[in-house]
Image (cartoon, rainbow, N blue to C red):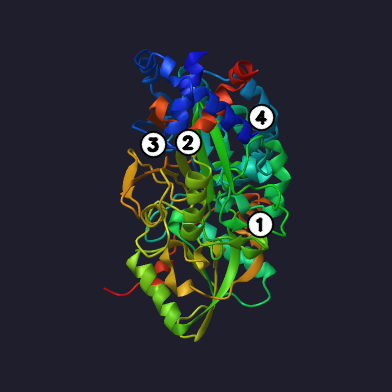
Amino acid sequence: MQFIYLLLALTLFSPTTSEYTSLNREVYDVQSLDVDSNMYYTILPYKTELDAQMNAVLCYSTQEMKKTKPESLLGNWTSDVCLEMAQDMYEDDIDLSFFNTGGLRSPIPQGEITIRDLYKLMPFENELVVLELNKTEMLDLKAYFNFTKGQPIAFADDFTLNDSLFLVLTTDYLANGGDKMKFFKDKTQHKVGIKMRDALINYCIKKDTISSNLDERHLILFDEN
Amino acid sequence: MKTRRTFIKKIGLGTALVGLSPLQAFSKDAKKPIKLTILHTNDMHSHIEAFSSGRNKGLGGMFQLSSLVKKIRQEEENILLLDAGDIFQGTPYFNLFGGELEFRLMSDIGYDAVTIGNHDFDNGIDGLASQMHHANFPFISSNYDFSNTILEDKVIPHKVFNKGGIKVGVLGIGIELKGLVDPKLYGNTQYLDPVTVANKKAHYLKKKLNCDLVICLSHLGFKYKNSKVSDMKLAAQTKNIDLIIGGHTHSFLNEPVIVKNSVKKDVLISQVGFGAIKLGKIDFYFDENMSNYCNFEHAFDSNVLDVIA
């Protein structure tokens, strides 16, 4: 009992807060061979439903599409499909689509294409938006394209650099300053009304097979050396 | 429930008996330090399962995190498990189930508190609010003002934990939403200046509520090249914060970064990447006899009543 009295007394006379006297920090890799079976059974119904949806086959790809520079099968396919799908939904004529290589997160495999493949390619909820660029800003885009040695891009059939106003299809992520695309900064974003991933999914639902090709489109914006 | 006033009276009685106790014998006992273990994650981004490809293949995810935390719980007594936001978005689990599974698993793992990241707004404040009943842990945000929104009564501005006699105050600081999150998603949420709010809140926790340790859960990001407010800036421009658990920039800090605060005291900044690939663990040691009376009020409650009665 005296201990308790003393403890109370000590605490009364000590400072009201204490400070730690030493510390130690570790970082663990999260990897475990132990299976938490309760948690496994919590996850299982979700995983089953998710796998059923994600594994749905949408179409067939005739080739593996990867990203390379200055142009790539994956970049060309993505940009072409987004431009085509967005143009179907958007009332004005879009001049070009422009994205970032970094945003394409995974290749398209050869063979059956599932929804999961498209989630892997585009895990983000980025929405397609159209921005109006004047000639100066278009030249800034061209300079960026050159500096970064090419980015996913697609041009409308009648595209020419001689225009004074350009309607550019991109994502809200890039329009908000993602990947330092300063020519997009503070632009009014006209929403197309579809997420980039959904545009790709809808296209694949529409088609039996998909394919891509290299057509040296980057030369339209590349400076001559 | 005993009131503070009667408690102090009881202490008064106790002090009279101090002289009767063998002080030395007691202080030997008291020297045993109290160990407080902070476990932390950030930016888990709906990673339920381990990464299935890439350089992090086989690592991460809440399923594996659960086993690891369970193991640590067997070894440590006083654990606070915290997350610095962006629980949502990153795998189809979020796209399909809206965060339900993330909150259920984090509840099972035993999270004590989390703060809100920008991606936690990805289904709007309604989407976040509608999932919160799956979480048994509090959401702490000190600088988002959710007045007149659906989150008004669902998010708290701070929380005090009592762990093994150590009083820990936790505040939460979120990133500016404008330009980062679609305004229709965050609605009437007001963003308040992080430095001002954190300073005020930390002062309140340390000086008014007498917390031994003040932790700021932050989703500001570790540091930036421009003038944007970050954990580095927050640490340097505030006082009364001991530890910042950060997120947003997905920074893998192998060691905590130590910054001098506005009164030249050390602030620790820690952040552990994303996707539950890593778990951070920080142990703080406190001398038992320095801890404040509130803790003992708690711990010795029943004994005191016996003595007085």
- Asked if residue B32 is positioned above or below residue B209 in the image, the reply reads above
Question: Residue B1 lies in what quarter of the image?
Answer: top right
Q: Which mark is residue A122?
A: none
- Circle 2 sits in a helix, a strand or a loop, which is it? strand
**B238 sits to left or right of A36:** left
In the picture, the quarter occupied by the C terminus of chain A is: bottom left
The residue depicted at 39 percent of the width and 52 percent of the height is B235
Q: CA distance from mark 1 to mark 2?
A: 25 Å
Q: Nearer the viewer, mark 3 or mark 4?
A: 4
Residue at the disc numbered 3: A19
The mark nearer the N terminus, 2 or 4, is 4
Q: Which mark is residue B40?
A: 2
Q: Position of residue B195 (x, y in %)?
A: 46, 58
Q: Which mark is residue B2?
A: 4
The residue depicted at 49 percent of the width and 87 percent of the height is A164
| Crowding at mark 1 (Cα within 10 Å: few <14, some 14-19, many 20+) | many
Nearer to the camera, B32 or B270: B32
Label 4 marks a residue whose chain is B
Q: CA distance from mark 3 to mark 4?
A: 27 Å
- Asked if residue B254 is positioned above or below residue A31 in the image, the reply reads below
Label 1 marks a residue whose chain is B
